Image (cartoon, rainbow, N blue to C red):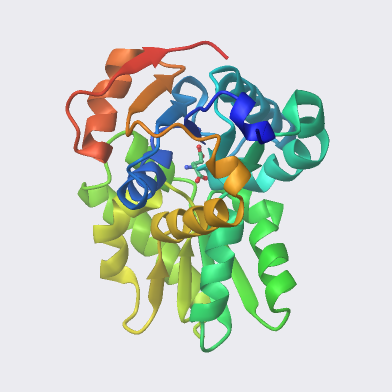
Amino acid sequence: MSPTDILARGPIGVFDSGYGGLTILRQIRQLMPQYDYLYLGDNARAPYGSHSFEVIYEYTLQAVEALFHKGCPLVILACNTASAKALRTIQQKDLARLDATRRVLGVIRPTVEAVCGLTVTRHVGLLATVGTVNSGSYEMEIHKMDPGIQVTGQACPMWVPLVENFEYDSPGADYFVQKRIEGIMRRDPEIDTLILGCTHYPLLMEKIVKYVPQGVRIVPQGEYVARKLADYLQRHPDMEARLHRGGSVSYFTTESAEKFRESATLFMHDKDLSVERIVL
Ligand code: DGL
């Protein structure tokens, strides 16, 4: 009997500060519908983008602990801000104490691996929250793979609130999207690849494509994160063996379940979501 046979199987945990991680969950489920998933949105405390390192780390750790408690052997931080500010500390410091057999993965590394193979000019732009841009995590990961790539970061503080308040379709959204894209392209006109480094941003895609110059590639993360996760599970059969295969998804939120259900429906195109409120 292998050690994994005696461990209970569980769902994959997917965490985000709010609804943005649903864009990642959708792509992961599309590629791997066989597993069970448990989504947690810390909607009551979102957005995380402009909080300090300590606060984002503390909130993210609480979320990981809650997902472990609910039986997830593997947790994906489907949030760039949490991946940038909390992932490394959780992996290096907290995991051994919480449960060394479980894993927490982020979204930055898989995105960077894709981007480094896409850019031809080797000038990459990053559109993300203040927290993600200021953390320098994308530059660090990109430079580990290719120190010659020039990375220009542009914080887009209004974009998450536009999405969370369902204003992503409004004329007001055009103003903020145009402003940030023109800003980053002015700072480095040689950019040929733009990372959407926030899981909320795919919701603004219709506006984004309007203002991105022709020939510049836009990289949303969901597809790459999903593919890298599938690859990870293939390379880690012990972890794969711990995942429950039922095809279900349950949602947890720190805000009201009713509010989450209404909003998440727009992200997931799914009407009957099972949602429960939890306190972290
Ligand atoms: N979806 C989160 C991210 O990818 C949004 C961050 C926030 O809550 O500000 O960064």
Q: How many numbered marks appear?
A: 0
Residue occupying the point 59% across, 41% down: 239
Q: Is residue 14 visible?
A: no
As drawn, is 265 to the left or to the right of 55? left
As drawn, is 132 to the left or to the right of 79? right
Does residue 82 lie above or below 253 as drawn? below
Percent coordinates x, y for residue 209 in the rendering? 28, 68
**Quadrant location, the N terminus:** top right
- 85 and 102: which is toward the camera: 102
Residue occupying the point 64% across, 61% down: 138
Percent coordinates x, y for residue 135 in the rendering? 70, 52
**Quadrant location, the C terminus:** top right
Percent coordinates x, y for residue 215 in the rendering? 35, 84
As drawn, is 154 to the left or to the right of 216? right
Percent coordinates x, y for residue 65 in the rendering? 64, 22
As drawn, is 236 to the left or to the right of 279? right
Does residue 65 lie above or below 19 as drawn? above
Does residue 206 lie above or below 170 as drawn? below
Query: What is the residue that sits farthest to the front in this orientation?
Result: 1
Q: Is residue 278 visible?
A: yes
